[in-house]
Image: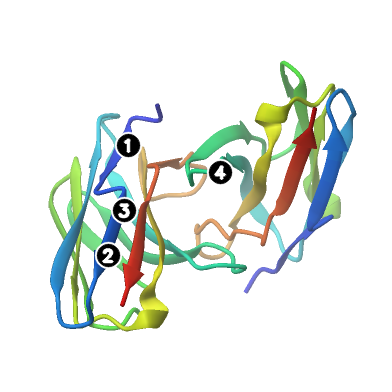
Amino acid sequence: GIQVEQSPPDLILQEGANSTLRCNFSDSVNNLQWFHQNPWGQLINLFYIPSGTKQNGRLSATTVATERYSLLYISSSQTTDSGVYFCAPESYNTDKLIFGTGTRLQVFP
Amino acid sequence: ETGVTQTPRHLVMGMTNKKSLKCEQHLGHNAMYWYKQSAKKPLELMFVYSLEERVENNSVPSRFSPECPNSSHLFLHLHTLQPEDSALYLCASSQDFRRKNIQYFGAGTRLSVL
């Protein structure tokens, strides 16, 4: 099945810093979602991005499906950005979301 | 608020207990999902229902029994669980169980099996 790798596994930032999170996947995908899981477990959709670039406030995402990767950019990070970021490509063969192991982000004031 | 509500938020049970997890979605979606999230592991898909019919069962032990009485409600019945079943159980829904669907998640039930 499709393999999903996220990097870095852990990231510590000071408030105001920028960061780039990467998601590599091993096979063709129908789409890709980015999620943020807050410390209480809630998964929030950030982006639905099968290809191209999207922006939402301080966050933006780019997926290059032909090269099998996606990037999530966080600018001017805030303490509320802390949590775990997951990418989840949808397998072309099975239509299932396959989750990576996530990037754990901690933003300190 | 994602439109998907899970209860209870926390559950502690003994190995001989029987309990149920509940999920309700207010989004008018046709597909609902159960996922398991264990520490340090990716989310694992357990079950998928589409229009109240189970379309996916990912080799889940029979001590987990799902039920979908209608497209808005999904249950996970638990009995004779093991300590390794302790995890965060997440429910999700999407418009359809087909490709290119956005999934929306509930806040999860954190289960501890003693």
- Which quarter of the image is occupied by the N terminus of chain A? bottom right
Q: Mark 1 belongs to which subunit?
A: B
- Dot 1, crowdedness within 10 Å: few (<14), some or many (≥20)? many
Q: Do labels 2 and 3 touch, CB within 8 Å?
A: yes
**Residue A97 placement: quadrant:** bottom right
Q: Do labels 4 and 2 touch, CB within 8 Å?
A: no
- Dot 2, crowdedness within 10 Å: few (<14), some or many (≥20)? few
Q: Secondary structure at mark 4?
A: loop
Which residue occupies 34% across, 78% down? B60
Do marks 4 and 3 share a subunit? no
Which residue occupies 19% across, 40% down? B72
Do marks 1 and 2 share a subunit? yes
Q: Report which residue position mark 1 lands on.
A: B4
Q: Residue B58: percent from the left, percent from the top?
A: 39, 75
Disc 3 versus disc 1: distance between alpha carbons? 16 Å
> Which of the two marks, 3 or 1, is nearer to us in this view?
3
Q: Secondary structure at mark 3?
A: strand
Q: Mark 2 belongs to which subunit?
A: B
* Label 1 vs 2, first from the N-terminus: 1
Q: Residue B104: percent from the left, percent from the top?
A: 43, 39
Q: Residue B97: percent from the left, percent from the top?
A: 37, 50
Answer above or below: position of B54 versus A15. Answer: below
Q: Report which residue position mark 3 lands on.
A: B10
Q: Residue furthest top?
A: A57
